[in-house]
Amino acid sequence: MKRIICLLGIAGLMVISMSGSAMAIVAGSGSLEWSLGFTPESVQYMGQYMDNKYGDFYSRTISPYSSSWQRVYLNDGYTGSDTFGLSSSSAAYDPSNADQSFSFTALTDDPNKVATVEISMGASFWPIGTFVDLPDFSFTYDFYGTTDSFFDNVGFGLTAQLTYRDSSNVWHSPYDDYDGTLGENSLRYYVTGGENLIIDESGTRAFSGYSTHDGQPGEWYFRFDFGGGGEDYLSGQSNATPEPTSLSLLGLGLAGIFLRRRRK
């Protein structure tokens, strides 16, 4: 369903591009669904800064440099839909099981401006429950993104951490992607530097066989960061060369998005 939404958005942007000058299209979507061997506690969406934030829009001029931005938030029903210039985004979150999804388009019609969308969702502190042997669980992810210009960028990422607090109030992390670098099991997809590029990635990650180290019940928690972003330069402009500062959002910069939120 989320891929259908993304494709419909791309189709709408193609109509725009065909009716005027050549306008680059950057679009993406992501979804995350859980299969749980336990009944989790309901967790309120906390957002990147604990305030239901799910992303940002940015717009900057190339020469002379100037920039503007807008944060976007989920409402009380844990959905959001926003626009900023020609760019748009939407997101949804289910507090009963942490299923979530997002879609975005980044679009500019000005050869001197760059349009960027950044989505950063996940769950900062998800109580799983008290167990000696953690029940098995897994999640299925789906990312889909497109660009149609040599200068465009699109990327996605997913990073996770499993922790528990033992009977002595000591924290343990039997699975941790947040070690200062993206762990080998972290997921990151990024494309740039060519026309008609597509990211089409999906899969399942399973967590099985985890137990407390001392055989005593522990309080288990899970956190994860889930998101992506796109950056649009007007197609065919020789002066629209991506700068390193702007590319920091994507590629290796995705690591920054998903390593910002650490357990205090």
Image: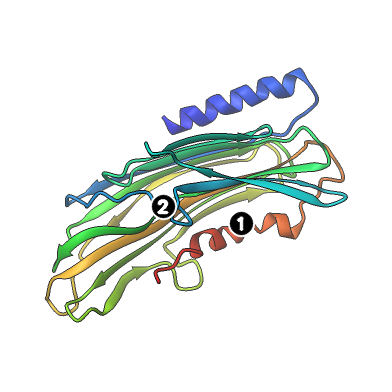
Report helix, strand or loop for mark 1.
loop
Q: Is residue 15 above or below residue 229?
A: above
The answer to which of 146 and 57 lies nearer the viewer is 57
Instruction: Give the residue drawn at x 71%, y 55%.
Output: 246
Asked whether the viewer can see residue 118, the reply is: no
Residue 122 is labelled as: 2
Give x and y (percent) for residue 136. 20, 56
Give the labeled residue for mark 1: 251
Near mark 1 (Cα within 10 A), the count class, few <14, some 14-19 or many ≥20, is: many
Q: Is residue 87 above or below residue 180?
A: above
Q: In this view, does 163 lie above or below 12?
A: below
Give x and y (percent) for residue 3. 47, 32
Relative to residue 197, is residue 259 drawn left or right?
left
Relative to residue 7, is residue 44 drawn left or right?
left
In the rendered image, the quadrant that contains the C terminus is: bottom left
Dividing the picture into quarters, in which one does residue 23 lie? top right
Q: Is residue 47 above or below residue 238?
A: below
The answer to which of 263 and 71 lies nearer the viewer is 71
What's the amino acid at mark 1?
Answer: Gly
Give x and y (percent) for residue 61. 80, 46
